Amino acid sequence: MRVVLSIYRRLLKLEFWRWKHVNYPILGLFALVLAWDTATQILLKIGVSSHGQFPMHSMRAVWSYLAAIATEPFVWLGVLALILAFLTWLAIIARVELSKAHPATSFSYVTVTMASGIFLHESISLLKICGIFLIMLGVYLVAE
């Protein structure tokens, strides 16, 4: 418990948490890129799930599979979300140091895991939650 309180106190000392210093447009762009990235992953998963596993036994099967998913609307929506995430990312790295911006994208592990639990009904085990916590701790340490 002491460790958690220590981390919490250190988080409160970060400039990010002092609301008068927050750059809201940049924070909004980060939220947007996380939303687009999460949407990309969920939409692509939904799009390919109805077509089975990716075949690896022959090139003919691979081309057949690719032709089938090329007509899938969820795949195209996922590609659109990916393009929007890319454009948002360009807006972020044009304004923020890459060494600070890139670690923040690790929060997509949190959002994708939560969204897959909600929309895809995937299980979220205690081990996954611990892993997500470690990722968030790592992002904090990189930003320090």
Image (cartoon, rainbow, N blue to C red):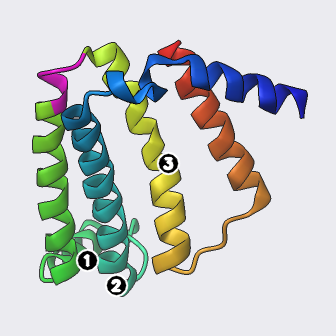
Three-letter amino acid code at the position of disc 2: His
Answer whether labels 2 and 1 touch (C-beta < 8 Å).
yes
> Please, what secondary structure does the residue beneath circle 1 have?
helix
Question: What residue is pinned by disc 3?
Answer: 109
Q: Quadrant of residue 38?
A: bottom left
Q: Quadrant of residue 99?
A: top left
Direction from residue 70 to residue 42 in the image, left or right: right
Q: How packed is label 2: few (under 14 Cα within 10 Å), some, or many (20 or more)?
A: few
Identified at 18% across, 30% down, the residue is 92
- Do we see residue 72 in this rendering? no
Direction from residue 133 to residue 120 in the image, left or right: left
Q: Nearer the viewer, mark 2 or mark 1?
A: 2
Toward the viewer: 50 or 20?
20
Question: What residue is pinned by disc 1?
Answer: 65
Name the residue furthest right: 1
Identified at 26% across, 28% down, the residue is 23
Q: CA separation, marks 2 and 3?
A: 25 Å
Toward the viewer: 70 or 91?
91
Q: Nearer the viewer, mark 3 or mark 1?
A: 3
The location of residue 2, given as percent across then percent down, is 89, 27
What range of the chain is rendered magenta? 92-96
Q: Earlier in the sequence, mark 2 or mark 1?
A: 2
Three-letter amino acid code at the position of disc 3: Tyr
Q: Earlier in the sequence, mark 2 or mark 3?
A: 2
Three-letter amino acid code at the position of disc 1: Tyr
- Do we see residue 41 in this rendering? yes
> Please, what secondary structure does the residue beneath circle 3 have?
helix
Q: How packed is label 1: few (under 14 Cα within 10 Å), some, or many (20 or more)?
A: some
Identified at 34% across, 84% down, the residue is 51
Q: Is residue 21 above or below residue 45?
A: above
The location of residue 68, given as percent across then percent down, is 19, 82
